[in-house]
Amino acid sequence: MRAQVSKIHSDFYYVSPIEVTDKHCVKDSIECKIREVLKKQDEKIYVGDFVEVENGYITKVLDRKNYIPRPSVANIDQIIIVSAVKEPDLDFLQLNRYISFAEYYGLEVKLCFNKNDLSSDDSLIEKVFSIYEPLGYDIVFTSALEGFELDTFQEIMEGKTSVLCGQSGVGKSSLINSLNPEFDLRTKKVSDKTQRGTHTTRHCEIMAVSDKIRIIDTPGFSNLKFDFLMPQDVGKLFREFQNHLGTCKYQDCLHIHEDGCSIINRKDEIISPERYESYIEFVKESKLYKDRVKTQGKKTETRSKQTHNKTTVKINVNKRQGSRRKLKQDMYKELEDE
Ligand code: GDP
Ligand code: ZN
């Protein structure tokens, strides 16, 4: 039987059988253990893994299309980055951090801006569209409170296994609840003092929110600092730079203050100030990694080495897919070379 791992508790694996005809129709989960051979091979099993199950034992882990190591989840169809337009205020650095993180792991990104009811002017909406729409990220503004655009949100989620991420208090639980009123995920009041809710999830788990919607509940991403890649690789996580990489005078150009940089000269045309500021911040973080590599003389490998064969974006699909595939290949090659 083929199944997907929906939850892991110490030595017990809970798997949902997958019908070949309807991958997203969720059946009750079954408790399994892992075959001794797999344990000996040190095969790591993630929530989201597709596996073969025989007589209550997992016998084989199928190839993953992608995975994130911390929290450990695999086979994510898309990541929905949820922000609030207010309470808490929209934080572009944090948003760009999530986006770049998703790019690093080859995940399809969708952007949701919730609490639209709290914003009285359109300038923020216009700004968001002007920055992120040309990059090909799908955008939806919602109000979980007033029911605004929740049908669009539902459409985005249908037929997929999604991870929702975003600061606490932005309305993730409220949005999930809106997908199925019977599915009661407790929402927490944002505390006035900290402007943050409390996060209660401790394990990763795939939740069947409705027949067609699966959401991976995660305890949040433990490390979102870019201190695990080299400074020259940070630019590869910014779609704005894709057509310009490799055109600067110096091969290892960081596009910050080098001469002959083809990006600095036309910065205002290429990237928004908010995105460029985030880029500089991530490069700073990655320099810590570079220093560590220098002093320890080795790299700690954190990147998934699998090929992500599916990357879908709305605009310029063919062109973008080609260049993104190339980008990933370059990144892997660089790692392997070193
Ligand atoms: P999470 O921490 O991201 O899961 O956020 P919650 O869903 O727990 O929501 C945090 C707080 O924001 C709760 O008090 C919700 O009632 C409130 N909230 C959620 N969505 C909206 C919205 O669209 N508009 C407004 N005004 N409040 C919302
Ligand atoms: Zn440059």
Image: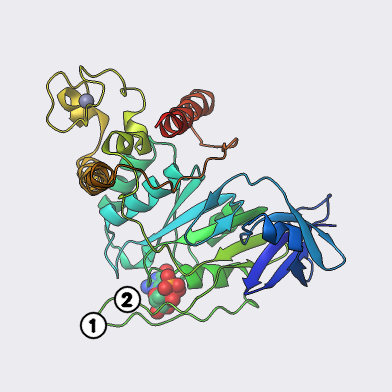
Locate the C terminus and report the quarter of the image it occupies: top left
User: Mark 2: few, some, or many residues within 10 Å (few <14, many ≥20)?
Assistant: some
Seen in the picture, residue 87 relative to 254 is either above or below; the reply is: below
Query: Can residue 212 be seen at all in this image of the molecule?
Result: no
User: Mark 1: few, some, or many residues within 10 Å (few <14, many ≥20)?
Assistant: few
Q: Is residue 134 left or right of residue 71?
A: left
Q: Which residue is mark 1?
A: 193
Does the closest atom of ligand 1 sit within 8 Å of the Cβ of label 1? no
Q: Position of residue 141 (x, y in %)?
A: 42, 56
- Which quadrant holds residue 119? bottom left
Query: Can residue 34 be seen at all in this image of the molecule?
Result: yes
Tag 2, which secondary structure? loop
Q: Residue at x 49, y 72 (%)?
A: 174
Q: Amino acid at mark 2?
A: Arg
Front-lying residue, 272 or 225: 225
Q: Position of residue 35 (x, y in %)?
A: 77, 63
Q: Position of residue 231 (x, y in %)?
A: 26, 38
Does the closest atom of ligand 1 sit within 8 Å of the Cβ of label 2? yes
Locate the N terminus and report the quarter of the image it occupies: bottom right
Q: Which residue is mark 2?
A: 196
Q: Which mark is residue 77?
A: none
Q: Position of residue 65 (x, y in %)?
A: 62, 44
